[in-house]
Image: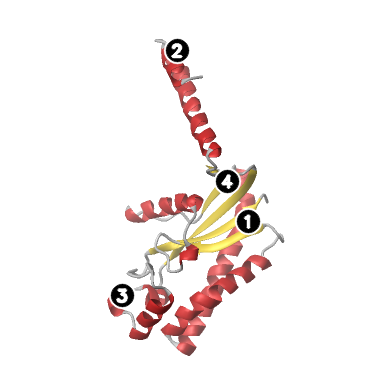
C-alpha cells in the first residue's frame, strides 16, 4: 500500500481517524524495517522482558569481570612501573585479558563479542560499530543533560538472518584513570611521550573524575 493511498483513506470520525493514524504508523514502521534489512543495515529491537532477564544474567557478570580484571592489572602496573607502564598494559595486556574473560564466560560459546568502546577512543580498533553507536548515543545524551546513566542497556539485533543480543554497561572515569586520561596539560611527560608513540590519533584525554568514559559491550548468541 502506498503512502498516498493511506492519506486518501483518512475518514472524518474520531474512531476511524485513530484507526487511520495507527495504520499510517505501522505502514511507516514497515518501511523503516524493510529498508534497514534491505540495505544490509542491522535491525535493532528492544528485547522482551524474558529475553532481557536471560541476557542480563549471562552478560552482567562478564562485563563486571572484565572491568575488575583490567582495573586490578592497571593498579598493579601503576604500583610497580608507574603511569607509563599502565599505558603499555592497556595496549598489550588489556586485549589478552579481554580474550581470557570472554573464553571463561558461561555457558561456553554464548559470548561472541567482548570489548570496551567509546565516542573518544584511544585504540582505533575499539571504535563503535553502527549498532554500538546507537547505545553510546543514549548514554552521551543522558550525560550531556546531567541525568543518571542507565545501569545497563540491552539490544536485540537482527542481521543477515541471525538474531543476537548486545549488553552494555557504562564505564565511569575514576582517579585511577586520570593518570593517563586526564587533562593533557597535567599528564606526566613520560606518559605524553608513550601516548604519542603508541597512539598518535589518541582522543581519550581531557576527562574528569566521574565523567562517562564509554561502554563495556557484551555480544551474545541467543541465550
Specify which label sits upstream in the sequence, 4 or 1: 1
Q: Secondary structure at mark 3?
A: helix
| Residue assigned mark 1 | 57
Q: Are marks 2 and 1 in contact (CB under 8 Å)?
A: no
Q: CA distance from mark 4 to mark 2?
A: 35 Å
SS class, disc 1? helix
Nearer to us of marks 3 and 1 is 3
Q: Is residue 72 visible?
A: no
Cα separation between marks 2 and 1: 47 Å
The residue lying toward the viewer, choosing from 74 and 210, is 74
Q: Residue at x 64, y 71 (%)?
A: 100
Task: Find residue 6 and report its horizontal and vertical position in percent.
Answer: 45, 17
Residue 112 seen: yes
For mark 2, does the 10 Å Cα neighbourhood hold few (<14), some (14 to 19), or many (20 or more) residues? few
**CB under 8 Å between discs 3 and 1:** no
N-terminal label among 4 and 3: 4
State the SS at label 2. helix
Question: Gap in Å between the C-alphas at discs 4 and 3?
Answer: 38 Å
Q: Give the number of the mark in front: 4 or 3.
A: 3
Closest to the observer, 185 or 11: 185
Tell me which numbered mark, 2 or 1, is placed earlier along the sequence: 2
Comes first in the chain, label 3 or label 2: 2
| Comes first in the chain, label 3 or label 1 | 1
Q: Which residue is mark 2?
A: 9
Which residue lies most toward the right here?
108
- The residues bearing labels 3 and 2 have C-alpha atoms spaced at a distance of 62 Å
The residue under the point 44% across, 61% down is 118
Q: Residue 4: give x, y in percent of width and height.
A: 43, 17
List the residue tagged with mark 3.
184
Amino acid at each position: 500500500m502506498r503512502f498516498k493511498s493511506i492519506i486518501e483513506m483518512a475518514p472524518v470520525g474520531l474512531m476511524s481517524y485513530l484507526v487511520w493514524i495507527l495504520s499510517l504508523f505501522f505502514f511507516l514502521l514497515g518501511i523503516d524495517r524493510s529498508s534497514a534489512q534491505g540495505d544490509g543495515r542491522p535491525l535493532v529491537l528492544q528485547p522482551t522482558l524474558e529475553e532481557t532477564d536471560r541476557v542480563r544474567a549471562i552478560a552482567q557478570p562478564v562485563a563486571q569481570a572484565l572491568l575488575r580484571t583490567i582495573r586490578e592489572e592497571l593498579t598493579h602496573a601503576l604500583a610497580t612501573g608507574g603511569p607509563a607502564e599502565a599505558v603499555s598494559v592497556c595496549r598489550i595486556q588489556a586485549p589478552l585479558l579481554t580474550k581470557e574473560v570472554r573464553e571463561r564466560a558461561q555457558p561456553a560459546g554464548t559470548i561472541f563479542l567482548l570489548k570496551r568502546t567509546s565516542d573518544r577512543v584511544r585504540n582505533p580498533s575499539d571504535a563503535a560499530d553502527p549498532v554500538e553507536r546507537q547505545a553510546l548515543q543514549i548514554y552521551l545524551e543522558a550525560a550531556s543533560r546531567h541525568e543518571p546513566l542507565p545501569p545497563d542497556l540491552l539490544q536485540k539485533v537482527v542481521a543477515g538472518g541471525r538474531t543476537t543480543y548486545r549488553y552494555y554497561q557504562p564505564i565511569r572515569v575514576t582517579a585511577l584513570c586520570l593518570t593517563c586520561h586526564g587533562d593533557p596539560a597535567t599528564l606526566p611527560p613520560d606518559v605524553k611521550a608513550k601516548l604519542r608513540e603508541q597512539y598518535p590519533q589518541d582522543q581519550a584525554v581531557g576527562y574528569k573524575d566521574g565523567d562517562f568514559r564509554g561502554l563495556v559491550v557484551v555480544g551474545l548468541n541467543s541465550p
